[in-house]
Amino acid sequence: MDGSMRRTEMIRRTLLAALGGMALALSGCDQDSRQQEADSGGGKVLRVGIVTLPADRGYPWNTTGIPNIFTHRTMFDGLTYVTEDGEVEPFLATSWEHIDDLTWRFRLRENVKFQNGKPFTADDVVFAVNHMVDPANVIDLTARELADLASAEAEDPATVLIHTRRPSPLLPAALELMVIVEPEHFQRLGREGFSLEPIGTGPFKLVKWTANGAEFDAFTESWRAPKVDKLILTEIPEKSARIQALLSDRIDVAVSLGYEDIQLIEQDGGKSFTGKDAGVLGVTFVLSKLPDGHPLKDKRVRQALNYAVNKQAYIDTVFGGQTVVASQPAVESSFGYNPDLEPYPYDPEKAKALLAEAGFADGFSFAMDVPTGGGAALEETYQTVAADLAKVGVNLTLQAITVPQLNRGVLQGEWAGEAFGMNYSAQRTTDSLRTMKLHSCIHPMAWFCDRTIQPVIEQALRTGDLDKRRELSRQVMAYYHDIAPAIFLHRIVTFEGLSAKIRNYRSDVNVIRYDKIELAD
């Protein structure tokens, strides 16, 4: 048995021994699952272990990413759908055309029904757009993401005109975020009531929220009817507990795992899925709060830190080589990604030389806020970064923060450290400039604001010419690569564990295609 196999077996035994003590804690979940399966009348039940339920339950417009996306995309559809490769596919809209700089025409899929039986028409899209542009709804993240929207009007039941405040050449991709709700039901119940009894056009209809999850029935009249009869989402916050639930056949899918976890699952007879996120992981510097003279204010120091980290080495060991080193704050499938940029190579000697040139030959110290409960192998990644920086004399202290603390940092500028771990994410619009709305002067609580590049960003966001926008976006990517406002690490990758009976599993940038999944007999 070679070293790799011994290590895997050791992990397996250690994990299984630790998980044994969780059996009692999971028994309630197991009993709930058995009862739900019994209630399904013997049909095929797909059981998925997620990290947490949405705080707003079934209200879909207050978030655009994980963990809420695992729940909301069971029930709701957008006009378009963005694939892992950044392609924009028809969904509730079958086609679209650019009428002028500020107007788009979308032709809608016909014979689509909501889960309460009402037909889907252009008026439902108008309702959603009106919600997005209403100043009272600026609290909703989706409304802020779609700030370019101005109004909409139905030309006929299957055609809608959408007007924007400024040229928005990537609007079809952006509208993937605006999932459609049943308006009369929404207006009758209000935001809070709708969150408990959501109605959309998706492949599953909510039956009930449970103590630790949600139960759905197949919506057989859906335009993309599912291949199973029932879906059960179970909230299992601890990754190790999700693994145990999968290995003990309590669930069929476990999300948000690490590479070593899927090795264990495959060794036990299960399967796995590796997905590409639309984001780049970065050690992001809070430059706006740092005093003049701080080492991180010097571009040479920031470049040195990028040279100091052996990114390919940890990708090979921690992620099994399943992702790539980042060269810029965008992934290769994003619009505006600059293919001419190369990642900073691992060169500790050059890092030391740059530190010395900047006047910090003896190194320096700084702290980084690390949000808990993040993506695959974040802890191992940041520990490797800290170890590599120590080799060039830089002491990085990792200090854990909660997700609410991260949100306070993003929204209010309350950072404890000089850096924090955060994605440069184009999820799910494919637009490399989406991330600039946070990582530039545009953000009201900007941690990085460079007035030199800001006019280029704003020009790119204003132009209606796709070729011009692509070129300007690439200029922005090149500038960020050079001034290094972060240590650009790797394209984020996701790992899901699957039971052996799962067929046709697909996930595009964290959207699980529940409608395509089949269960073998």
Image (cartoon, grey):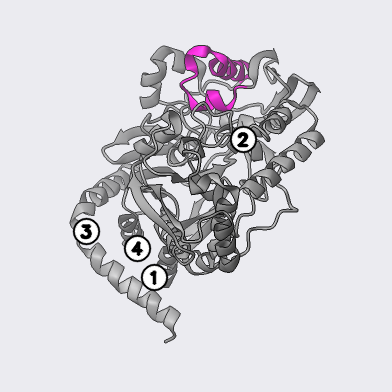
Mark 1 touching mark 4, by CB under 8 A? Answer: yes
Residue 180 visible, this angle:
no
* CA–CA distance in space, label 1 to label 2: 51 Å
Q: Which mark is residue 268?
A: 1
Give the x, y percent position of residue 231.
Answer: 41, 43
Report helix, strand or loop for mark 4.
helix
Report helix, strand or loop for mark 1.
loop
Report helix, strand or loop for mark 2.
loop
Q: Which callout, 2 or 4, points at the residue further toward the start of the chain?
A: 4
Magenta residues span 121-147
Q: Which mark is residue 23?
A: 3
Q: Which mark is residue 247?
A: 4
Q: Is residue 248 above or below residue 236?
A: below
Mark 2 touching mark 3, by CB under 8 A? Answer: no
* CA–CA distance in space, label 2 to label 3: 53 Å
* CA–CA distance in space, label 3 to label 4: 12 Å
The one of 93 and 5 positioned closer to us in this rendering: 5
Mark 3 touching mark 4, by CB under 8 A? Answer: no
Q: Which residue is mark 2?
A: 450
Q: Is residue 199 above or below residue 7?
A: above
Left or right: 40 in relation to 331: left
* CA–CA distance in space, label 1 to label 4: 7 Å
* Amino acid type assigned to the residue bearing label 4 in the image: Leu
Residue 494 visible, this angle:
yes
